[in-house]
Image (cartoon, rainbow, N blue to C red):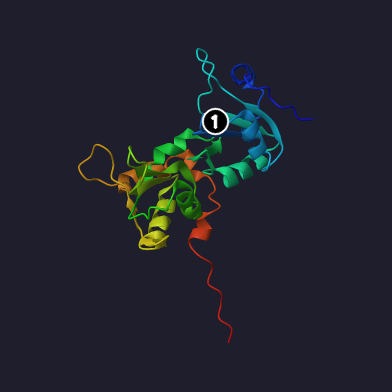
Amino acid sequence: MTTRIAPGVGANLLGQHSVERNQDATAYVSNLDPQVSEELLWELFVQAGTVVNVYVPKDRVTNLHQGYRFVEFRSEEDADYAIKVLNMIKLYGKPIRVNKATQDKKSLDVRANLFIGNLDPDVDEKLLHDTFSAFGVIVINPKIMRDPETGNSRSFGFISYDSFESSVAAIEAMNGQYLCNRQVTVSFAYEKDTKGERHGTAAERVLAASNPSAQKSRPHTLFASGPPTLPSIA
């Protein structure tokens, strides 16, 4: 039997029951518009699997929710499926971000960051995610740089993978390919606070190889390299 959380109770549940919650079966949902209600989120995520609860952290002073939720499923498989199909869909015009609540943050240290240039105005974050997730695990949702006043795309963005193997595969496959109506450029991004140095240096790769979290399986990598070559039939 599943129980639906009552609106406004999430602040207590987050603190009191986070240990009891099945972290492996919990999705972390962020970048939520203030208009997104617990009921709407429930109805959306129940399409992906059996939802056990929706946890709503709220500001202790204002009692307003803080732009993110935790959605607990009955099984880890349901949570993984929700992340796959619901990440970056738009609610009230904002692409929501759906990640595993237990994601190993050490993977972010790999810094296999790519620069995607010459983007068509119609390319959004979801299209970038759907396209580039074929080459490996994306650890930070794609970001398209936009004009702060108009919100229009500035025609470039960034993607971060959990391994340099994935980023190299993406560069080899996608540099010069068309997304919508433009031929995009894909390269390693420049590092911050350096004089024109890009990610992907030999030193970075050595550090990444020694990172235990980099040893995870990457189910999409084989897909990225293309179908196997079949023997010719005489």
Task: Answer with the quarter of the image where residue 10 lies.
Answer: top right
Q: Which residue ends up furthest to the right in the rendered image?
A: 1
The image quarter containing residue 190 is top left
| Front residue of 117 and 226 | 117
Which quarter of the figure is the N terminus placed in?
Answer: top right
Residue at image location 45% in from the left, 47% down from the top: 125
Of the pair 134 and 122, the residue shown nearer to us: 122
Residue occupying image coordinates x 42% and y 52%: 123
- Tell me the amino acid under the disc marked 1: Gln
Q: Is residue 231 above or below residue 135?
A: below
Would you name the residue on which mark 1 appears?
A: 35
Residue 186 in the image, given as x and y percentages of width and height: 35, 55
Position of 153 with respect to 23 (left or right) is: left
Could you say which is closer to the camera, residue 150 or residue 101? 150
Position of residue 18 relative to residue 232, above or below, is: above
In the image, residue 69 above or below residue 9: below
Residue at the outermost front position: 150
Q: Position of residue 82 (x, y in %)?
A: 62, 42
Q: Residue at x 48, y 62 (%)?
A: 225
User: Helix, strand or loop at disc 1?
Assistant: loop
Q: Quadrant of the C terminus?
A: bottom right
Q: Residue furthest left?
A: 195
Q: Is residue 206 visible?
A: no
Q: Residue 74 at what x, y percent from top left?
A: 71, 35
Q: Residue at x 44, y 39 (%)?
A: 211
How many numbered marks does the figure carry? 1
Residue 100 visible (yes or no): yes
Instruction: Looking at this view, name the residue that lies furthest to the bottom.
Output: 234
Q: Please give left or right for residue 61 compared with residue 37 in the image.
A: left
The 10 Å Cα crowd at callout 1, few under 14, some 14 to 19, many 20 or more, is few
For residue 152, which quarter of the picture?
A: top left
